[in-house]
Amino acid sequence: MAGTEPRVHYLAGFSCPLGGLAAGKPRVLCHEQEVFLSTGSEFVYVYDQEGGLLTAVYRFPDQVWHLQLLALRRALYVLCARKGIYCLSLESPTRRSSSQTDEDKDSEVSSPVITVDPEACVLPDTTLCAFTVHDDVLVALVQGPAQWKMQLFERPCPGEDRWPGGLVGEVELSTSTPPAGAPGKLTSPCFLPVLCCVSPPGSRVPRGHPQGCGGFMLEEALFGLLFGADATLLESPVILCGLPDGQLCCVVLKALVTSRSAPGDPKALVKILHHLEEPVVFIGALKTEPQAEEAVESVLPCEDVYSDCLVALGHHGRTLAIKASWDKSGNLVPELREYCLPGPVLCAACGGGSRMYHSTPSDLCVVDLALGGVPLNSEQPQSDGAPGCLPPLLCPASLSICSVLTLSVLSRTPAGGTELLALSTKGCLMTCRVDLNSEMPGPTRMTTENAGQKIKELLSGIGDVSERVSFLKKAVDQRNKALTSLNEAMNVSCALLSSREGPPPISCTTTTAWSRLQLQDVLMATCLLENNSDFSLDQGWTLCIQVLTSSSALDLDSAGSAVTYTIPVDRLSPGSQREVTLPLGPSESGVLDLPVTMSYTLFYSLKEVVGGALAPSDPLEDPFLEEQPLDLLPEQEGICLPLSRHTVDMLQCLRFPSLAPPRASVPCPLGPAADLVDTFLETCRAPGSELAGPAALRAKYLPPSTASIRVSAELLRAALEDSHSVVPGAAVGPQPSELCCVLVAVGVLSCVVLPPRFSFKLCFLKTVEA
C-alpha cells in the first residue's frame, strides 16, 4: 500500500560545515538516474540513484554558485565564484565507473576527487553572478561598480579553447548596489540574481532537459502581453532577470544580438515588468486552468507544457502572479496579483502543472493555483474569483518536511502523487513522495498502518523544535552578553574621551628598575594599569604597549622596528590594578639604546565580542546573512583609546649601588654611574667629524640633545659641609661617597667638550624624594 511507504527516503549524506548549510548557493539537478549536486562549497557531486553511489566528485577553485546541464550534449556548465564559468564534459574517461564495491557505498571519501583543469574555464570573469544557456548562446549577468550588465556570448563546448571575441551583445539593466565590505575586496553577495529563458509558443526546446535548468514556455496570449510585439514577431526567446533589489525585468534575446549594430538607446531593450521590493529568489511558470486529473497525471516534466501564468517569489514571501485574462470590455489584458506566502523563502520549484512548492525554515509548503484559493485538503468547491482568473488568496498546505535548501521536481508517481528531490540543511540528499489526495492529515484518513509512521514523524518534529529552541536560547544569551559588553565599552570610551581636566579615569604609569636575569643586568619597565572609573574592562579589551627606540624611529628602512606587546585584560573591575613587566634592554649585542618611548593604548575588539553574536546559531533563521559578520568585522576592527606616553631616557637608568638598600644590592655591580654618561657622550661625535647612517638622520631631524641631572640642594649643601668639617676617625653625617656618582657625572659633563646641538642642565631641588 502506498500509505505504508515512507514519505521521505534518504539517499546520501554530504560534507556539511558546522551549523549547517546556507541557503542561496546549493543546487540539485536530476537527469534520468543521475543527480548533479552542489552544496555551496567548491565540490560538485554526481550521484547515481540506481546504484546508490557517487560516481564522481569535481573540485573547483572556489565556491560553486550555479549549475546547468545540457543533457543531450552531456555538458555541465558551472559558475565558480570569483573565477568564471566552467564547462565539463560528462563523457570524460576520468569519470568513475559504476563497478564500485558495496563497502564503498554511501562513502563520500571513497569517490575520486577530480580537480577541474583551469583550461575548462570557458568564460573567466570575477564579477559573474548568474548565467543561463539556451541553444547556442550563453547569457551572463555581471555586477559592475554601478550597473548590472547582461552579456550574450556564443555558447562554448567542452574542450574548446577560450574564445577571445565571443561577446555578441551587451546591455545595462539597472543600478547595482555594491556589496558590503572593504573597498577593493571581492565579497560573496547575500543574494544571487535569478536568470531564466522564456520560449515563445511553437519554438522547439530540446527535450531531455532536467528540471531547474532555467527555461520554460508560455502560451501565446501571455507571451505577447508581457514581452510585446517585437518578441512575438521575431519568435525570439526572452531572458527574465530577477535582481536582488526586487526588480523583475526582461530582455528580448534576438534584439540583444543586434544591439551593437542597431541605432538608438541600448537601455530601451530592457523592460521592467514589476518590482517586488525584496530580493527575487525564484521565477517559474504554472498552469492555472482546471484540468482533468488524468490529464495532469499524464504530463511529464520533460514534455513541452505551455504555461499560462508567470510567478516570481521574493525572499520574504511576497509572490507575484501574472496571467492573461479578459476584461469587462472583452479585451485581453495582463492580470497581476500579489500574494503573501510564509517566509523567508529558501527555495521553490514548479512541476509543470498548477502546483508550486516552496521551502521555509520550518516547513515545505505547496500551493495550487488551479483550485482558486481553496486549501488543498478542503472539500469545498471553488467559490472566490471568476473562472479563468487568478484567485484572490493563496492557501499553502504544509507537507511536514523542514530544512529543505534546494528543490527539484522529479516526476509524478503512478498513484497520483509527486516525487521531489531535495537537499537538507544538514547535507542530506533525499526524495520526498507527496500524495496530496491520500496523505493529507484528517481523522477519516488515519489508519492503523500509518499511525506508527505518523507518531514517528511527530516525535521527530518535537526533537527538531527542541533543538531549535536550544539554539535560539543560546543565540539570545550571546547577544545579550554582547550588548552588555558594548554598553560597557561605550561608557569607558566616553569616560576617557571626556576627561580633559583632572586625573584620567584609566591610567597607565611606568617605573624602571635594574634586575639581574641569567647573569646579565637587564633594565625592566613596570607598567601599572589602574582602573579608577566606575566601569569594568571585561572580554574584548587588550592593553597594547608599543616600545620605540630612538634608532628605530630613525631607521626608515625597517617598517616593523617598533615592538608591540598585547596583554589581554580579562577582567579589571573598578579600583583594580594590573601590573605588567617588560624588558627594555640591553640587546643581544650589549647595547642599551636610549631613549625609549612607550605608548599605551586600550583596544576593544568588536570581532571577538560581537562576531559570535551576529553569526546565526540556526542557519535557517537568516540563511543569507551567514557570511556577513565575518566580512563586516575584519581582524583589526575595533575601538582604539590612547592612554598615555612615557619616555625612558638615560638619566632614569643611572644606578647608585652605594645608595641601594642592602637587600637590593647586586652581588656583581656594574661600573660607576659615570660610565653611562661617558657612553652617552661617546655617541655624539666631534664637531668636525662626518656622520653616516642613522646617526646622520638623528643629527638632521631630531631636536638638540639635552641632559638633565636633578640634585637636591639641601643634600648637596649638607654633604659639602660634612666634607669640610669631618674629623679623622669620626663618621658623623652623610658621607660624600653617597653623592659620588652624581658628582662624577657632573664632573664629566663639565670637563668634556660638548658637541653641537647638545646642552647640559643641572637642576637643584628643594626637597629630596624618599
Image (cartoon, rainbow, N blue to C red):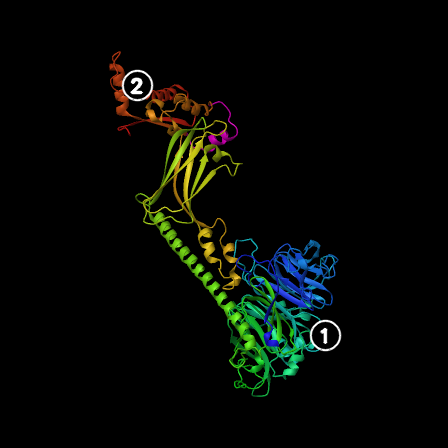
Q: Is residue 20 above or below residue 399?
A: above
Q: Quadrant of residue 382?
A: bottom right
Q: Amino acid at mark 2?
A: Pro
Q: Are marks 2 and 1 in contact (CB under 8 Å)?
A: no
Percent position (x, y) of residue 263?
66, 68
Is residue 700 shown in magenta?
Answer: yes
Q: Tell me the residue at 57%/73% (across/down).
A: 357
Furthest residue toward front: 448
The relative height of residue 316 versus residue 661 in the rendered view (above or below) is: below
Looking at the image, which is closer to me, 557 or 155? 155
Q: Is residue 252 magenta?
A: no
Per the image, the residue denoted by label 2 is 736
- The residue closer to the viewer here, 459 or 508, is 459
- Amino acid tagged 1: Arg
Picture quarter containing residue 240? bottom right
Q: Where in the figure is residue 341, as x and y percent of width and height?
A: 51, 73
Near mark 2 (Cα within 10 A), the count class, few <14, some 14-19 or many ≥20, is: some
Q: Is residue 271 visible?
A: no
Secondary structure of residue under mark 2: helix
Query: Along the polypeptide, which appears first: circle 2 or circle 1?
Result: 1
Q: Position of residue 570 (x, y in %)?
A: 40, 46
Whether residue 422 sits left or right of residue 488 in the image: it is: right
Would you say residue 84 is visible in this rendering? yes
Q: Nearer the viewer, residue 454 or 209?
A: 454
In the image, the segment drawn in magenta is 687-704
The residue singled out by tag 1 in the image is 204
Image position of 501 with respect to 356: above or below = above
- Mark pair 2, 1: CA separation: 113 Å
Q: Is residue 648 above or below residue 81?
A: above
Where residue 698 appears, as percent x and y from the top left, is 47, 31
Q: Residues within 10 Å of mark 1 (few under 14, many from 20)?
A: few
Total labels drawn: 2
